Amino acid sequence: MPLSALDSKMQLKSAQASYQKGDFNEAVRLYTGVVQNDSDPSVFFNLGNAYYRSGDPGSAILYYEKALKLDPLFRDAAFNLKVARKSLLDKEKTEENPFVIMADSFVRLLPVNLLL
C-alpha cells in the first residue's frame, strides 16, 4: 500500500535516523518503503548506502544504478557504484581462489609472534 506524502516524509526521517545510528538493516527496511513512493535519486542513493553498509553490495549496486538512471550526473552515486562493484568483485575473487583460502588458513594457524 502506497504511503501518503506525510507518512513517506516521516519514514524518510526515520530511515535517516536509523542510518545515522548505524542500524543499517532498519534503514534498509525504512528506505525500501520510501522508494516505492519516491522518484528522488537521493533516496535510491541512500538505500544503496544502507545496503552497502549492511554488507550487501549486490543490492547496493542495484540502487546506485537506479539513482543514476534518474540522474545520470549524480557523481556520488557513480563513485559509490564503482566502489560497490569493486568490493563485490574482490569478494568473489577471494572466495573463489583456493590458494587465497589455503594461505589464509595457514596464516591463521601460525602463532602471532611468528608473524612479527
Image (cartoon, rainbow, N blue to C red):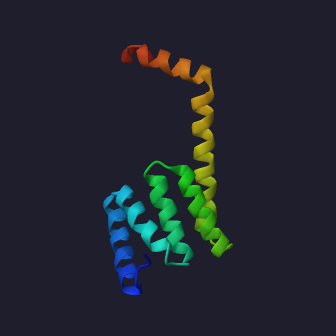
Q: Residue at x 33, y 64 (%)?
A: 18
Q: Is residue 107 above or below residue 20?
A: above
Instruction: List the single residue furthest toward the front.
Output: 1
Residue 12 is left or right of residue 105, and the answer is left
Residue 73 x, y percent position in the rendering: 67, 73
Q: Quadrant of residue 20?
A: bottom left
Residue 105 is left or right of residue 84, and the answer is left
Q: Is residue 89 above or below residue 111?
A: below
**Considering depth in this image, is 83 or 48 the residue closer to the camera?**
48
Q: Is residue 37 above or below residue 93?
A: below
Q: Residue at x 59, y 44 (%)?
A: 88
Quadrant assignment for the N terminus: bottom left
Residue 104 x, y percent position in the rendering: 51, 22
Q: Quadrant of residue 29?
A: bottom left
Q: Residue at x 38, y 57 (%)?
A: 24
**Considering depth in this image, is 86 or 65 the residue closer to the camera?**
65
Residue 11 x, y percent position in the rendering: 36, 74
Residue 46 x, y percent position in the rendering: 48, 67
Residue 41 is left or right of residue 17, and the answer is right
**Considering depth in this image, is 85 or 56 the residue closer to the camera?**
56
